[in-house]
C-alpha cells in the first residue's frame, strides 16, 4: 500500500537525492542534492514523497519563498525535482502528491505556487502559463560600457552592497546574504546546463551600481562556442548594460538573456536587438484568489481597487472606471493580462513576477 506524506528524516532525503539523480543527472552533472539544497533539506521539511514498504518511489520537491512586488509581499511555494521511479510510473502517484502539496500550500497561506514543469498533469491541476518575457541573444560589440563605469568580478567584501541592490529591485525573491551565497554556490538552474556561476559588478564613483550573475559553460564542456546565460541581475540599468558589455572580456562567447517585460528600462536598452517573445518558463497556480489579493493590497494601492460582488465575481475600480470580472477571468488577468481590456490596465496586469530561472529556481 502506498503512503503519501512529508519526508521525515535525513535518510529519506538521501533516498530522494538518489532517485532525483537517477532521473535527471548524468556523470557530468553535480548531484541534485548539491544543486538544490533547499529542495532536499530536512531542516525545511517541506518536500513530499510516495512510499511503498518505506521505499521512496515518487517525489515532489517543495520550497517556500516570499516574493516582493513593490511594498507587497506574497507568500509562495516552488515545485521542482518531480520524479517517479520507472518501475512505479503510470499509477498516478505524482498527481496524488500534487494534491498533497496544494493542500500544504493552502494551509501555509501561500497564495502562489511556481511549477518548473509544463506537463498536462499540472495544467489539469489548475496551473497555467503566465507572464511575458523577451529572449535576447547578445554578441560581443552589441553593447558598450557606459562612461563612468568599471566592471570587475565580485570580491569577498561586496556582499552588503549586493544585498542593497537586490532589495532595490521592484520585484524579487527574498534572499538573505547567506541565502544568496548558498544559492550562488549551488548553481541550481545553471547546473542543469552544466554551467558554472560568475558574478560581475559595475562600479561608479567607488560604489557598486549593478551586478549580474552569469551562467558560464563549464571548462570541461570542450567548447568555447556555447552560450552563457544571464541568471540574475540588479541595480541601475546602465550599470547592468556595462556588465553585459564587459562580460565578453571574461571568457564569454555570447549571451542569452530572458528579460521580463516589466523590466522596461533594460528592455529599452536592448530594443535594437532581435528578440523572441513568450511566456515565462514553467507554470503557476493561484491557490486562493482572495488571499493573493489581500497579500497584494500594497501593490494595488493607488492603482486599482478590487471588491467582491459575490463569491464568483469581483469589480475592478480604476481611473473613475469599473469592470466586472468572474474570479476565473480575474485570475487570468492577473497572470497573463488581457489586451482586449482597457489599456489603462496594462500598467498593472499581468502583475510583475520574478523570473523563475534565477538563483531561486526549483
Image (tube, rainbow, N blue to C red):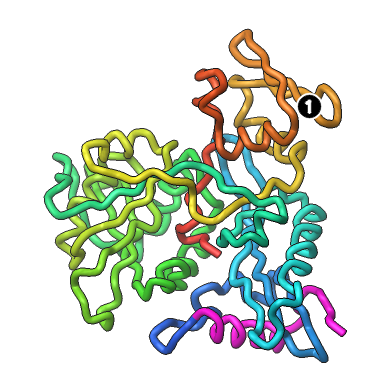
Judge left or right: residue 147 versus residue 32: left
Judge left or right: residue 86 versus residue 244: right
Above or below 196: residue 257: above
Which residue is tagged 1?
313
Give x and y (percent) for residue 74. Answer: 65, 44
Within the image, what quadrant is residue 299 found in? top right
Judge left or right: residue 12 versus residue 277: right
- Please state, as top left, top right, bottom left or bottom right, where the C terminus lies in the image: bottom right
| Furthest residue toward front | 90
Task: Depth check: give the residue in front, 326 or 78.
Answer: 326
Task: Depth check: give the residue in front, 108 or 124.
Answer: 124
Give x and y (percent) for residue 126. Answer: 70, 51
Judge left or right: residue 156 versus residue 206: right
Give x and y (percent) for residue 124. Answer: 70, 55
Task: Depth check: give the residue in front, 306 or 117.
Answer: 117
Task: Depth check: give the residue in front, 317 or 251.
Answer: 317
Residue at the (44%, 86%) spot, across then down: 26
Callout 1 crowding tier (Cα within 10 Å): few <14, some 14–19, many ≥20: some
| Furthest residue toward top | 320
Residue at the (17%, 45%) spot, across then down: 143
Q: Main secondary structure of the magenta part?
A: helix
Q: How many marks?
A: 1
Within the image, what quadrant is residue 10 found in? bottom right
Q: Is residue 77 magenta?
A: no
Give x and y (percent) for residue 86. Answer: 64, 85
From which residue to which does the magenta span run? 1-24
SS under mark 1: strand
Within the image, what quadrant is residue 71 found in? top right
Residue at the (55%, 86%) spot, across then down: 22
Residue at the (32%, 47%) spot, across then down: 210
Amino acid at each position: 500500500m502506498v503512503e503519501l506524506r512529508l519526508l521525515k528524516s535525513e535518510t529519506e532525503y538521501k533516498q530522494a537525492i538518489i532517485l532525483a539523480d537517477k532521473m535527471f543527472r548524468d556523470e557530468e552533472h553535480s548531484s541534485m542534492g548539491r544543486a538544490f539544497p533547499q529542495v532536499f533539506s530536512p531542516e525545511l521539511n517541506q518536500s513530499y514523497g510516495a512510499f511503498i514498504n518505506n521505499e521512496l518511489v515518487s517525489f515532489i520537491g517543495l520550497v517556500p519563498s516570499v516574493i516582493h512586488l513593490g511594498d507587497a509581499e506574497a507568500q509562495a511555494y516552488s515545485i521542482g525535482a518531480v520524479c517517479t521511479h520507472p518501475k512505479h510510473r503510470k499509477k498516478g502517484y505524482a498527481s496524488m502528491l500534487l494534491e498533497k502539496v496544494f493542500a500544504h500550500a493552502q494551509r501555509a497561506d501561500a497564495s502562489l505556487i511556481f511549477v518548473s514543469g509544463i506537463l498536462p498533469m499540472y495544467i489539469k491541476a489548475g496551473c497555467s502559463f503566465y507572464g511575458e518575457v523577451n529572449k535576447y541573444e547578445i554578441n560581443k560589440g552589441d553593447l558598450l560600457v557606459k562612461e563612468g563605469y568599471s566592471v570587475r568580478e565580485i570580491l569577498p567584501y561586496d556582499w552588503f552592497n549586493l544585498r542593497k541592490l537586490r532589495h532595490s529591485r521592484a520585484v524579487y525573491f527574498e534572499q538573505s546574504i547567506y541565502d544568496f551565497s548558498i544559492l550562488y554556490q549551488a548553481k541550481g538552474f545553471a547546473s542543469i546546463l552544466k554551467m558554472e556561476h560568475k558574478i560581475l559588478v559595475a562600479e561608479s564613483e567607488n560604489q557598486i551600481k549593478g551586478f549580474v550573475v552569469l551562467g558560464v559553460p563549464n571548462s570541461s564542456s570542450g567548447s568555447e562556442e556555447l552560450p552563457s546565460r544571464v541568471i540574475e541581475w540588479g541595480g541601475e540599468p546602465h550599470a547592468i548594460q556595462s556588465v553585459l558589455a564587459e562580460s565578453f572580456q571574461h571568457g564569454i562567447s555570447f549571451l542569452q538573456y530572458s528579460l521580463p517585460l516589466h523590466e522596461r528600462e533594460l528592455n529599452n536598452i536592448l530594443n535594437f536587438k532581435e528578440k523572441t517573445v513568450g511566456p515565462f518558463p514553467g507554470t503557476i497556480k493561484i491557490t486562493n484568489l482572495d488571499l493573493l489579493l489581500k497579500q497584494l493590497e500594497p501593490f494595488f494601492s493607488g492603482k486599482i481597487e478590487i471588491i467582491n460582488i459575490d463569491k464568483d465575481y469581483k469589480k475592478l475600480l480604476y481611473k473613475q472606471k469599473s469592470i466586472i470580472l468572474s474570479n476565473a477571468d480575474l485570475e487570468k488577468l492577473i497572470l497573463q493580462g488581457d489586451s482586449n481590456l482597457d489599456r489603462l490596465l496594462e500598467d498593472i496586469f499581468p502583475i510583475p513576477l520574478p523570473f523563475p530561472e534565477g538563483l531561486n529556481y526549483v
